Image (spheres, rainbow, N blue to C red):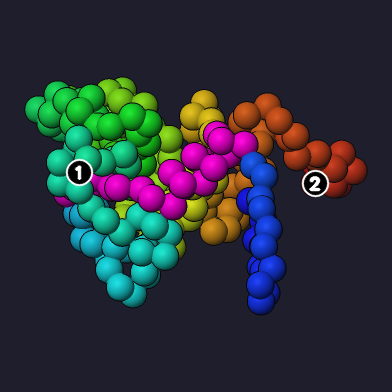
């Protein structure tokens, strides 16, 4: 939606679709439910504090009843015992609802490679945005919130999003591309020959 300014006694009108207006309203009125279980909770508190001013995104009001919330922040490690509770909380939330996996442990289990830890909350509930990092920086949290708002404004829930790291080193990016079978780095044949000779 564009901006419109009227001066003096001018009058005007704006045209839009109802679903676009509804998506715009949802984008700026998120009621969050923080489900913090571990050390990432401290980082979540830092991101929610006045220094990073999450209020400017319209997502500053926490609701400690899932029936009044539409954004679930899963912050920290989820154990097998907590998994049914998390699922029940998600089921009780109002529709439409969104989920953000905060940190490595919530996204993929982190370094807990054991039978007591859930290897990612997407085994239990659908996730809209993943935030990598142990713990993630507040800037990554704000990036995730903006990605989710963009997703809400587009009206779709199909694609999962991952907050990209600030900078991927070139050698890791080439390695990732070659593993995915995408644009693998071209090897210079003449340099390889020179090495062997």
Q: From what the image shows, is residue 95 above or below residue 10? A: above
Drawn side of residue 181 relative to residue 161, left or right? right
Q: Is residue 116 visible?
A: no
Horizontal side of residue 133 vs 7, given as left or right:
left
Q: Residue sitting at 32 percent across and 42 percent down? A: 71
When the figure is inspected, residue 176 is found, relative to residue 90, above or below; the finding is below
Question: Mark 1 highlights which residue?
Answer: 35
Q: Residue at x 73, y 35 (%)?
A: 184
Cα distance, mark 1 to mark 2? 55 Å
Image coords of residue 119 (percent x, y): 28, 29
Q: Residues within 10 Å of mark 2 (few under 14, many from 20)?
A: few
Q: Nearer the viewer, residue 42 or 96?
A: 96
Mark drawn on residue 171: none
Q: Residue at x 40, y 47 (%)?
A: 131
The x and y percentages for residue 143 are 48, 55
From the top left corner, tell me how far across and down residue 139 is, in percent.
Answer: 43, 63
> Residue at the spot x=46%, y=47% of the render?
25
Give yes or no for residue 150 being in the magenta stretch. no
Q: Which of 42/146 is in front?
A: 146
The residue segment tinted magenta is 17-38
Q: Secondary structure at mark 1?
A: strand
Does residue 164 appear in this view?
Answer: yes
Image coordinates of residue 50 in percent, x first then y, are 30, 73
Q: Dot 2: what SS?
A: helix
User: Residue 109 falls in which quadrant of the image?
Assistant: top left
Task: Name above or below for residue 63 compared with residue 67.
Answer: below
Residue sitting farthest toward the right: 190
Of callouts 1 and 2, the N-terminal one = 1
Specify whether 4 is left or right of 31: right
The residue carrying mark 2 is: 195
Q: Of the residues tagged 1 and 2, which is closer to the observer? A: 1
Q: Quadrant of the C terminus?
A: top right
């Amino acid at each position: 939606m564009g901006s419109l300014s009227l001066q003096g006694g001018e009058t005007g009108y704006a045209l839009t679709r109802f679903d676009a207006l509804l998506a715009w309203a949802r984008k700026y009125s998120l009621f969050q439910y923080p489900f913090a279980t571990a050390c990432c909770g401290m980082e979540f508190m830092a991101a929610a504090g006045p220094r990073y001013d999450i209020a400017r995104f319209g997502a500053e009001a926490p609701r400690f009843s899932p029936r009044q919330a539409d954004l679930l922040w899963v912050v920290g490690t989820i154990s097998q015992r907590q998994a049914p509770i998390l699922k029940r909380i998600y089921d009780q939330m109002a529709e439409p609802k969104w989920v953000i996996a905060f940190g490595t442990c919530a996204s993929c289990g982190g370094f807990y490679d054991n039978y007591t830890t859930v290897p990612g909350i997407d085994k239990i509930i659908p996730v809209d945005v993943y935030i990598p990092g142990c713990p993630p920086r507040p800037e990554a949290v704000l990036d995730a919130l903006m990605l989710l708002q963009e997703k809400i404004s587009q009206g779709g829930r199909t694609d999962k999003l991952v907050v990209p790291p600030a900078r991927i080193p070139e050698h890791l990016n080439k390695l990732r591309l070659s593993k995915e079978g995408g644009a693998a780095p071209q090897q210079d044949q003449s340099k390889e020959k020179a090495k062997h000779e």
